[in-house]
Amino acid sequence: MRRGIFALAGLLLSACSALPVPIDLLGYLGTSKSGSFQQPLPAATIGFERPLPDKNGYSLDFSQEQLYSVRGAQVEYGATLSYTGQTVLSGEVSLQAYLAPVNGEDLWQDKYKLGEAQHLQLAQGQYLLKLAGSVPFNNDQIQALNAKKLRFGVYAKGTVSSSQPATVTFNYEVTQLTLKVALF
């Protein structure tokens, strides 16, 4: 009987360690999860690059979370970039998400990319660009997760053509940032 109870307890513990524990990090962004930036455009085609929210990305400190030793994790993320205005735009914009440790390294390195960039065509009347994905962490990201401090950002770049000279305002918002971690 005792062996059966210990076997059942061991089975339950191993099952619990295999289940991913979700942690919603969107709240750690606070009011900075959305913002806007202005881009001057001549009546021509120009290239632009813009880290969002800025060159440092978002700093996420979730040290109060009760995580122990993380052995595997993935992140589900989502972000939008939109434009509303009178100026007709065309071109292509790509959005790439990044997740890195908070250790002074450049957030925008290839090793910190989350999935592939999403390329979207700007067309008259269609100015809402959505980025979404679910990606497993690499070893550097897991080490940062165990330190309970991360940086997250989205890099927008592309070419934009304007029908007339204008300064246009783009709005961005992080819509999802959820960790799913496997403990032990």
Image (spheres, grey):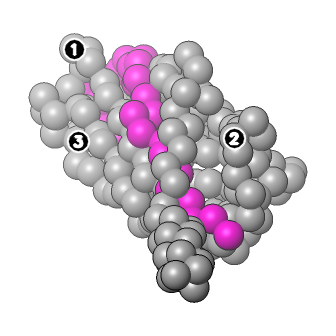
User: Secondary structure beneath disc 2?
Assistant: loop
Q: Are marks 2 and 3 in contact (CB under 8 Å)?
A: no
- Left or right: 87 in relation to 182: left
Whole-percent x and y of residue 143? 76, 65
Residue at 39 percent of width and 44 percent of height: 78
Residue type beneath disc 1: Gln
Find the residue positioned furthest to the bottom: 3
Q: Is residue 164 magenta?
A: yes
Q: Which residue is mark 3?
A: 122
Distance CA(mark 3)–CA(mark 1): 14 Å
Residue at 23 percent of width and 49 percent of height: 121
Find the residue positioned furthest to the right: 104
Distance CA(mark 2)–CA(mark 3): 40 Å
**Structural crowding at the residue carrying mark 2, measured as other residues with C-alpha within 10 Å and reported as few (<14), some (14–19) or many (≥20):** few
Whole-percent x and y of residue 72? 59, 70
Residue type beneath disc 2: Glu
Quarter of the image for residue 79 reads top left
Q: Which residue is mark 1?
A: 86
Asked if residue 4 can be seen in this view, the reply is yes
